[in-house]
Amino acid sequence: MFMRRRRGGRTDTILLTGWLFADLLLGLMVIFMITAPGAPPPPPPTPTPIPTSTPTVIPSSTPESTLMPEPTLTPEPTLTPTPIPTPTSIPREVLSRTSLEYTLFAGSGFAELDFEIANKLASDPQLQGRRAGFVLVFSTDETRSQAVIDRLRAVMPDLFSSAASRNYIDLNLRGSANADQINVEVFLFEQGP
């Protein structure tokens, strides 16, 4: 028997769709079988007591010695359950979505920069007892920005020692009267939900 072919190839498309669906199911089955866990391991065998005999010598009036075995049982080992620790909740810290912004003016050396940090950041009550998560520093050159990050970590190590940092070049400050200005944004950790 011959099968008549319709125009437009509609029969071929339907047949190919069926094969595609069957191949898809076959592939999903293979993936499922690969990722399915195997059978659990068999439990360890339990020890059984084995009677052992201990020979004893009983003196008699006859010159021959008679051995009388006394059966003794080996005691079973006792299993001691291992205590399972109770999970405790660890307070979660999340990074604050708002930042604290500071403007520092660094002159020629670290002494002036340390003075600015001590005046503006160390005296801020919002930073007391907190930990910084991320620090952004904007200045006229990368070297100055990195120096500010290093000085922040040196002057206030409890606040900035583990903070991630990034320095940026602020092109708006170049060539302006505020070329010594350094902008610092601090994102603090706060207790999460």
Image: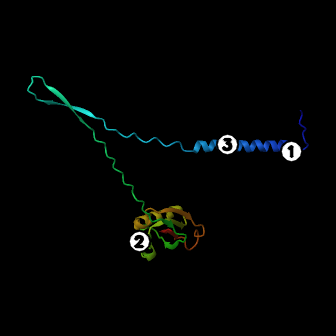
Q: Nearer the viewer, mark 3 or mark 2?
A: 3
Q: Secondary structure at mark 2?
A: loop
Residue at horizontal 27%, vertical 38%? 74
Q: Secondary structure at mark 3?
A: helix
Can you say whether 54 is above or below 14 in the image?
Answer: above
The residue type indicated by label 1 comes to Arg
Asked if one can make out residue 124 in the rendered structure from this viewpoint, the answer is no
Q: Earlier in the sequence, mark 1 or mark 3?
A: 1
Task: Describe the colour scheme in one phrase.
Answer: rainbow
Q: Earlier in the sequence, mark 3 or mark 2?
A: 3
Residue at horizontal 28%, vertical 41%? 75
Can you say whether 164 is above or below 97 in the image?
Answer: above
Screen quadrant of the N terminus? top right
Residue at horizontal 31%, vertical 46%? 78
Q: Secondary structure at mark 1?
A: helix
**Residue 101, percent from left and from top:** 52, 73
**Residue 35, percent from left and from top:** 58, 44
Q: Label 3 to label 2, Cα distance in Å? A: 56 Å
Asked if one can make out residue 130 in the rendered structure from this viewpoint, the answer is yes
